[in-house]
């Protein structure tokens, strides 16, 4: 571990990795509690997998894969939200379809690009050690947007997440707020892909918030705790993986998963006594 | 004076399953209307039509001289089944506070997107609403641990905090013991001095001593002044079911 903190002073890629980890942790700390209390982890998963389709296409047509990811994430968030609000059923099937189609499109396009197979693995499992500076700025900007929206509209979003029908009756623009929430989650998913990868996005988006929910009892507090917890876990995961040269993404998620188990045990023990 | 709620020839079906047919109903300012009828008679559906959550297939609905959608922020509503999960991490105070959000009496839909900050005025209104339903002691509790009757009071406070002109309650005493049921109806009677109230109930005998008029719904609607509720009417409305109730009374 101390090895990592010494290396941190010397290697820029490690500094970038650390910043990327912290920025991603802030994003999932802010959005995770909404995902957890509204139980839309599956939606986040659907969005995450549709992202691969967008990235594959962007790569194939020579565009920026991050732009492709953003477009795909936002489009699938809007589609899922629209179906959810207007059809009232079939949402889970649609998410499953986006999930499968997104993956398939992504892999098909990427398979047509010579030499990109390696990149596919890094999109699936993340490669925090290769984050370029430009994307740090990008992640910072996304975090700023998330923070701004939460600061301005937390209560309105909370009202929709808590009791959608009542929010509608109060005259709140429920469709706008719900789609806004899904788009923000989509942005967060894109942000997280660089750190822990597509496969592991769900864990980082849900588990720290769920842990926070075991110990505090308001969504705002869950955000604060989940953010701090995520920052700590991402940095610790990075540090642990550095010495033995483990892939950081899976290390981080394993750490998150273990913390979740321990937290669950603690909260059960506390409730029993 | 214009009626506050007016339904003319309203018909509604879920898919092809007709639930309400040819409903005419006029509610005047400060009326206290009891809505009774058998299970699946369409009582909840009627309230949801008045709130603009459902749109009638036939006929017209006017609420406060406008469409239900345009005026629903002026109504207070306590649903039969709450639209949230009980283990949502939220305190009673927060739930009631969220009732303050939304459109004001004057102000477009976008006004509800203005950022809101907790302030003294708001805290006072939350305290007042909880006090009115005699639930002040619950303010700091999580909604998770409330009893059915406690939750009903909290939801009533959430409906009252926006100072509605009409209050719609769908079986507000379903989970409540008899004494508390009396308390809640006494409270409604007091509220009735400043707002119109529509309350759905199973217990026709009980509500008739509080309300000014009873509407009986079983797909179609028949309205009666409370004095006219007699065995013949009950039999028409509930058919065979009522005999069991009558039997209970004789023993
Ligand atoms: N969302 C829905 N989709 C399809 N059918 C519905 C829906 N909601 C209600 N119904 C049907 O409409 C009919 C009337 O239902 P409603 O809830 O209005 O009855 P109710 O008088 O409130 O009954 P209860 O006393 O049980 O609350 C019932 O036959 C019910 O099955
Ligand atoms: Mg009902």
Image: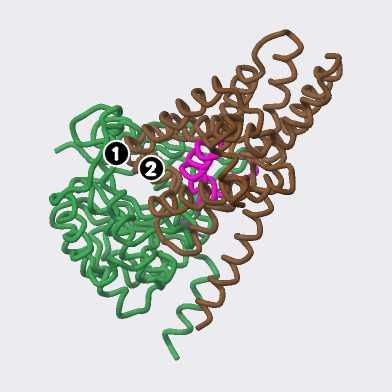
Q: Position of residue B197 (x, y in %)?
A: 25, 54
Quick one: SS at disc 1?
loop
Q: Determine if the magenta segment contains residue A27.
A: yes
Q: Residue at x 46, y 84 (%)?
A: B248
A109 relative to B152, above or below:
above
Q: Residue at x 46, y 64 (%)?
A: A215
Check chain identity for marks 2 and 1: say if they share one.
no
Magenta range: A20-42
Q: Which chain is green?
A: B
Quadrant of the rendered image containing residue A153: top left
At 50% from the left edge and 83% from the top edge, which residue is drawn? A273
Total numbered circles: 2
Within-10-Å neighbours for mark 1: few <14, some 14–19, many 20+: many
Determine the CA span between mark 2 and mark 1.
7 Å
Residue at far bottom of view = B251
**Residue at the disc numbered 1:** B102
Q: Which residue is mark 2?
A: A167
Q: Which subunit holds the residue at mark 2?
A: A
Tags 2 and 1 touching, CB below 8 Å: yes
């Amino acid at each position: 571990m101390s090895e990592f903190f010494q290396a941190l002073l010397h290697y820029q890629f490690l500094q970038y990795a650390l910043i990327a980890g912290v920025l991603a942790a802030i994003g999932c700390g802010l959005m995770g509690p909404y995902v957890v209390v509204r139980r839309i982890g599956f939606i986040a998963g659907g969005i995450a997998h549709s992202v691969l389709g967008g990235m594959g296409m962007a790569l194939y047509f020579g565009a920026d894969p991050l732009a492709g990811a953003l477009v795909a994430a936002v489009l699938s968030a809007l589609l899922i939200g629209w179906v959810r609000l207007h059809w009232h059923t079939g949402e889970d099937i649609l998410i499953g379809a986006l999930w499968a189609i997104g993956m398939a499109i992504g892999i098909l396009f990427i398979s047509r690009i010579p030499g990109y197979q390696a990149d596919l693995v890094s999109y699936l499992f993340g490669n925090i050690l290769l984050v370029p500076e430009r994307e740090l700025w990008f992640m910072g900007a996304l975090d700023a947007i998330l923070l701004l929206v939460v600061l301005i509209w937390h209560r309105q979003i909370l009202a929709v997440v808590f009791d959608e029908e009542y929010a509608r009756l109060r005259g709140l623009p429920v469709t706008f707020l719900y789609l806004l929430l899904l788009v923000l989650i989509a942005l967060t998913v894109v942000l997280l892909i660089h750190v822990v990868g597509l496969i592991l996005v769900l864990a980082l988006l849900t588990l720290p918030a769920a842990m926070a929910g075991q110990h505090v009892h308001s969504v705002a507090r869950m955000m604060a705790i989940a953010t701090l917890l995520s920052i700590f876990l991402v940095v610790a995961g990075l540090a642990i993986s550095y010495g033995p040269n483990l892939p950081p993404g899976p290390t981080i998620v394993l750490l998150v998963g273990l913390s979740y188990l321990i937290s669950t045990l603690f909260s059960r023990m506390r409730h029993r006594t | 004076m214009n009626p506050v709620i007016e339904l003319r020839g309203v018909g509604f079906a879920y898919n092809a399953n007709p639930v309400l047919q040819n409903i005419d109903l006029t509610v005047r300012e400060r009326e206290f209307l009891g809505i009774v009828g058998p299970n699946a008679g369409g009582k909840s559906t009627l309230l949801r039509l008045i709130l603009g959550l459902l749109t009638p297939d036939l006929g017209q609905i006017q609420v406060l001289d406008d469409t239900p959608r345009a005026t629903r922020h002026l109504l207070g509503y306590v649903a039969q089944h709450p639209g949230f999960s009980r283990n949502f991490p939220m305190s009673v105070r927060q739930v009631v506070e969220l009732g303050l959000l939304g459109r004001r009496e004057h102000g477009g839909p976008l006004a509800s997107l203005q950022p809101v900050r907790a302030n003294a005025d708001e805290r006072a209104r939350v305290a007042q609403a909880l006090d009115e339903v005699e639930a002040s002691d619950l303010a700091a509790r999580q909604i998770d641990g409330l009893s059915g009757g406690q939750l009903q009071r909290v939801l009533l406070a959430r409906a009252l905090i926006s100072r509605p002109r009409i209050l719609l309650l769908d079986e507000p005493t379903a989970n409540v013991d008899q004494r508390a049921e009396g308390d809640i109806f006494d409270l409604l009677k007091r509220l009735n001095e400043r707002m119109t109230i529509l309350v759905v109930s199973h217990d026709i005998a009980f509500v008739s001593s509080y309300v000014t008029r009873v509407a009986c719904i079983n797909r179609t609607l028949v309205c009666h002044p409370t004095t006219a509720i007699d065995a013949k009417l009950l039999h028409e409305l509930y058919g065979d079911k009522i005999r069991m109730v009558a039997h209970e009374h004789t023993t």
